[in-house]
Amino acid sequence: MVLDRLDPRRPDRQRLRAFPDDAPAAAAELFAENGTQWGIAYPLLGSVCNHWVVPTPGSSDHGSWFAFRQGGALFRVFNLDATNPLMIPVLGSYYIANVPTFVPGPVSGATQDLRARVKHATAPAQGGYWNPMVTQEDIQRAMAAPLASAPCTLQQIQDVIPGFVPKPSGVPLPVWSKHTYIEGWTIGTDFIPYYTRVCYLWTGDASSKQQTVFIGLGVDAGQGVYLQRTDTCLNTHETDQPYYTWSSNQWLLNQCLPKIPGVGLPYPDWVSRDGGVVMGMITGNPAFGLAPGQSLNLVAAQLPRGGGELAIFWLWFTGEGDGVLFTEGNFMNPLSHNLQLIDYTLFAKDAGISQQDFSNPCGVALPGPGGAVRSVTGHAKRPGRSLR
């Protein structure tokens, strides 16, 4: 719905907007007003999607991403900013929101009536605080003292998301195999999804390693190129970061970015070690690319990093143990965070990976045998801005 509500802190924005109740008119207006650029096309949950980015006002390096199925139906919104630059209500903060069903059409009479009542209603005072639902802090306040609430049953939830069960019992947590190979696309900072490849080899000693390859760099929306590459080479004591450029039909080492000390590759059972919980399961829902009887497990895990920083992971795995999606968000304070995701297009367990499949021109001789650092930092990290 569209909520016509003034925000005294943001006089440049006069409305809070959302999908899909007033689509397609509001969607077209939202994109036209904000310099939307096409990023690239790649599949999500079995459907080819076009990925568009709306640059964040005042920022030079990122924006909010919208994925549309081929044919035009909105499928996902990915907002990196805690300040809610697109003024989308309820979601407000940085988030990933999937839209499994999207039916564009005229606004219903019931929605028009609700909009009118919301527009002219007077919100009850909450200790002198007026909540415009703009930032993460606003959302937290609103949830603590909601204007209205209504109970719902599991059946009502399943009417919206068929096959969904919250916190199912007896579902095992996912485990990486000791030889795992992944391909996919990463969205984080920069105006381009990076092509991503992961090789993971677990030996249980200092020869364990992981190499994540990110191809692509784009500081101008819609103008990214795939002629630059950054690797994160994780071993048991640090992470090396070779940076390459494409020239003469080959990758040439340009420089070694600063090492990340004390950041190692994850254990195969890192989800369990970081307190993972299966928060929900979806079974047989074709909107999520599932065959009849096939399940998708939605897993959350967290890892305190010290100094008030908390890493939160969301992982989607099929019931067969195949990875679908990985996200990492690092919360520092109500208005400071980072967030990125990897959409897997290939997840191969027990892959034929050996030491010869890894490269690290920025590495040094390894120290004596030791355990892996209990962290997955670096799994999907981008380097700093030194290249720009």
Image: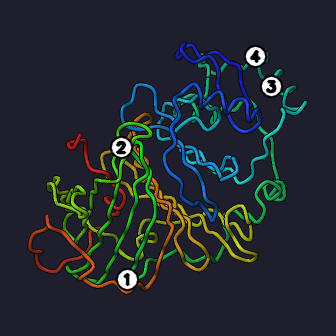
**Amino acid type indicated by mark 2:** Gly
Measured Cα–Cα span from mark 4 to mark 1 = 58 Å
Residue 191 visible, this orientation: yes
| Within-10-Å neighbours for mark 3: few <14, some 14–19, many 20+ | some
User: What residue does disc 4 label?
Assistant: 122
On screen, residue 347 above or below 263? below
Q: Nearer the viewer, residue 198 or 305?
A: 198
Between tags 3 and 2, which lies in front?
2
In contact (CB < 8 Å): disc 3 and disc 2: no
Distance from label 2 to label 4 (Cα)? 45 Å
| C-alpha gap between disc 4 and disc 3 | 13 Å
| Image spot of residue 369 (x, y percent) | 16, 80
Q: Secondary structure at mark 1?
A: loop
Residue in the image at 64% along x and 15% along y: 6
Check disc 1 and report the residue beneath it.
178
Disc number placed over residue 115 in the picture, else none: 3
Horizontal and vertical percent for residue 352? 37, 87
The answer to whether 131 is drawn above or below residue 183 in the figure is above
Residue drawn at (49%, 30%) of the image: 83
> Which residue matches tag 2?
218
Residue 257 percent location from the top left of the image: 17, 53
